[in-house]
Amino acid sequence: MDNVMLARTLFGSSMAFHIIFATLGVGITFMILLAEIMRIVRKDSDYGTLAKRWTKGVAILLGVAIPSGTIVAVMLSLLWPGFMEIVGQVIALPFQIEIFAFFLEALFLSIYVYAADRLSSTMRIVSVFFVALGATASAVLITDAHAWMNTPRGFSIVNGEVTNVDPLAAVFSPSIVVTAFHVVGSAYLTGAFVLAAVAAYKLLRGNLSKRETAYHRKGMMLSLAVALVMSIFTALNGHETAVMLHEYIPVKLAAAEGLFETQSNAPLSIFGTPNPEAGRVIGGIEIPGMLSWIATGSTDGVIQGLNDFPRNDWPPLFVHTLFNVMVGIGMILLGIAGIAWLFWFIQRKKQQSFPKWLLAGIAISGPLAIIGIETGWIFSCTGRQPWTIHGIQRTSEAATNSGHLGMLFILFIGLYIILLVITALVMYFYFNRNPVSNDLGIAAD
């Protein structure tokens, strides 16, 4: 394995680890805010208990998210010196502002964790609002740099030197809005599905008192409400993403769909394997005209194929599979949330318990959402290859020439496995020793 691939593997595995905790940190803090609002609107202390226990979980997750994020930041400098040479001159602004967003999140999380019981209802909401705002702002600001890598703006390179730097033009690159909405929406979606999955698992196991059953049901339905809305939003945003790719990164769109020839009435290919020799997707299901309609608003729209671009500028064709997995999981999650709310609506007067098959579906939605996040990020970054900065700097030009990256990869993989195990054990023992029955007994309205 060459140095470039080793650098990509090491950084990619670190990012894949960190993104789990970062995404849940954004999504669950938003759910805590909604639970606090529901506590006041419904005058129901169970929502306050939900917020309290979800906050404990977030605090544990942040204990891993912060150091793993620091590792990713350090790796950017160590593994990609060529990239950082340009980034430091052009797109440093969002990284600098992100420090303040994290400060905001950490400050108000401390206030909320240690003083929530002594704050008024209004100040509790204000505190957790700034926690959610800081977490979301951090996600948007980091996403800004990622969006700029896809659609770089705000500078010129003359004789190998960066000139004519316009930081605001770099910050507001053409893909930032659609990409930021997608990242934040999918983070809210994932946080909601994970919390719904935990509640469904508890209900599925049974052996709960009526009070505990009602508590978990409230948490599950609140989470599923957010999950349903965000599933729809993310699906609609996917259309806007296709429009953006068609305009600015057509080679990535072509690779995602395995489209080789430029054509109107371009089909949407589901499943299958892109075959360059055959010039089509083998074993896939094609929906005629759908890709043209999604990307241009008309089945007559012309979509560029991979053959319009030099072969060495093609992304790896397995991104087609990643794209299918991401979209497929999104559709499954939308279906789970929709069926759950439909069941609730039909049976709302009877207060009938959810059937086990539906609870089982909700229970697996959390892991599915995390897999969707992982495949989405891998698709987004791999689909930009062979470029680190699209059309400006190739990944091979950005990577370090240092050796021993294979050993570092093994050491960090071991570290991440240990951290995952420790995090799971801490979560298990904390909530096992602090059951919800204790909180429900002391919760105040």
Image: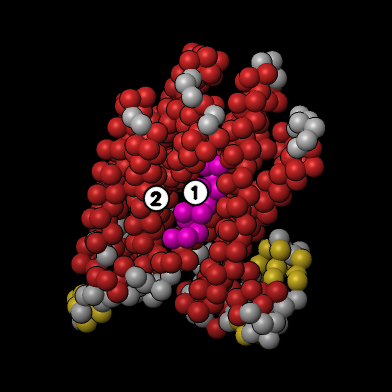
Name the residue rendered at 75%, 43% in the picture: 345
Q: What span is in magenta?
A: 180-192
Q: Earlier in the sequence, mark 1 or mark 2?
A: 2
Tell me if I can see residue 109 in this picture: yes
Name the residue rendered at 51%, 26% in the picture: 45
- Percent position of residue 52, x then y: 45, 28
Label 2 residue SS: helix
Taking depth in this image into account, of 237 and 374 the one nearest to the observer is: 237
Q: Is residue 152 left or right of residue 182?
A: left
Which residue was labeled with disc 2? 136
Which residue was labeled with disc 1? 187
Q: Are marks 1 and 2 in contact (CB under 8 Å)?
A: yes
From mark 1 to mark 2, how far is it between C-alphas?
9 Å
Taking depth in this image into account, of 273 and 148 the one nearest to the observer is: 148
Name the residue rendered at 57%, 77% in the picture: 306
Amino acid of disc 2: Thr
Taking depth in this image into account, of 353 and 317 the one nearest to the observer is: 353
- Percent position of residue 27, x then y: 48, 44
Name the residue rendered at 68%, 25% in the picture: 203
Question: Eyeballing the image, is 65 above or below 323?
Answer: above
Quadrant of residue 319 in the image?
Answer: bottom right
